[in-house]
Image: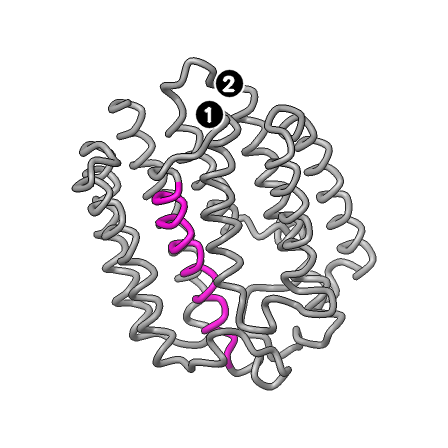
Amino acid sequence: MNPWILASRPRTLPAAIGPLLVGNTLALHLEQFSWLIACTSMICALLLQIAVNLANDYFDFKSGIDTQERLGPIRVTQSGLLAPEKVRNAMIICLILALSVGSLLIYHGGWPIAILAAASILGALGYSGGPYPLASHGLGEVAAFIFFGLVAVVGSYYLQASDTSIAAWLLGSAIGLFNAAVMLVNNTRDIPTDTKAGKFTLAVRIGEGQSRVLYQALVYLPFALIIGGFFMGLLPGLPVLLGGLSLILARKLNSEFSQTSGEALNPLLGQTAKLTIIFSTLFSIGLAFSL
């Protein structure tokens, strides 16, 4: 496989697409809905996700976290497929492109979107790099919940509606939990190597047993949120019903995660990311026919 495709980590990209799909579909019925803004926001999110992946690859290599003992998929910097400088430069280019594309969103959404854009870029750099790397201090799952849940859904809805809604915050929380689960799988797999390298992820801090309990909560709570939203009159029944079908996959993944560890968790990482996009797609289809 092309090393640049490996570096972009395609299996993680649903984490960026899913929340933008839901946020924009939630605003689809609005008179001022703009397809240009919807497509631009998705492109910007994908560029930021790729930038995060490149930054993680580069900074983990520079800090000595990625070694030959790594259990996860190939890291292009550590394996020598790409020079560190090339990965760093590609990360910078992705951030510049994201900011360039996002300038339309900032112009359209004003200062709240400008603040979110600045926070997103700082988050992309600060996840693995900087003086206080979020991933090394047990905040990776929190960052995923905030940026690929709340910020993505509520921000994309705000761009269309010039306002927020309780439904957007509820759905942002649900998808944020799924994306936090993706991060937890990654960090649980890497407990041995991260511990040795002094990278204190949440999984390292709470251990593999409690990580399995947390994963269960992260993949089940979104369904409780949307069902609660339905009973409170905040969400229509059809998207809740369709989105609820992905509970079948959530149960399967939880069962596999409870019995798997180490390198064997690699397939589960991509499957958990698929759970995000499947839930988001089904829920969005329901929304499109309900609003």
Residue 161 is marked as: 1
Location of the C terminus by quadrant is top left
Q: Quick one: which residue is furthest to the right in this view?
A: 85
Q: Main secondary structure of the magenta part?
A: helix
Kindly report the distance in space between the C-alpha atoms of the residues bearing marks 2 and 1.
Answer: 10 Å
Q: Is residue 174 magenta?
A: yes
Where residue 45 appears, x then y in whole percent? 57, 40
Point out the stretch of residues depicted in magenta.
Answer: 169-191
Name the image quarter holding residue 166: top left
Where residue 178 appears, x then y in whole percent? 38, 54
Q: Quick one: which residue is furthest to the top in this view?
A: 31
Where residue 2 appears, x then y in whole percent? 66, 49
Evaluate if marks 2 and 1 touch, with contact meaning CB atoms under 8 Å apart: no
The first of marks 2 and 1 along the sequence is 2
Disc 2: which residue: 34
- The residue at 51%/44% (across/down) is 151
Amino acid on which the number 2 mark rests in the picture: Ser
**Within 10 Å of the Cα at label 1, are there few (<14), some (14-19), or many (20+) other Cα atoms?**
many
**Within 10 Å of the Cα at label 2, are there few (<14), some (14-19), or many (20+) other Cα atoms?**
some
Q: Is residue 285 magenta?
A: no
- The residue at 35%/78% (across/down) is 210
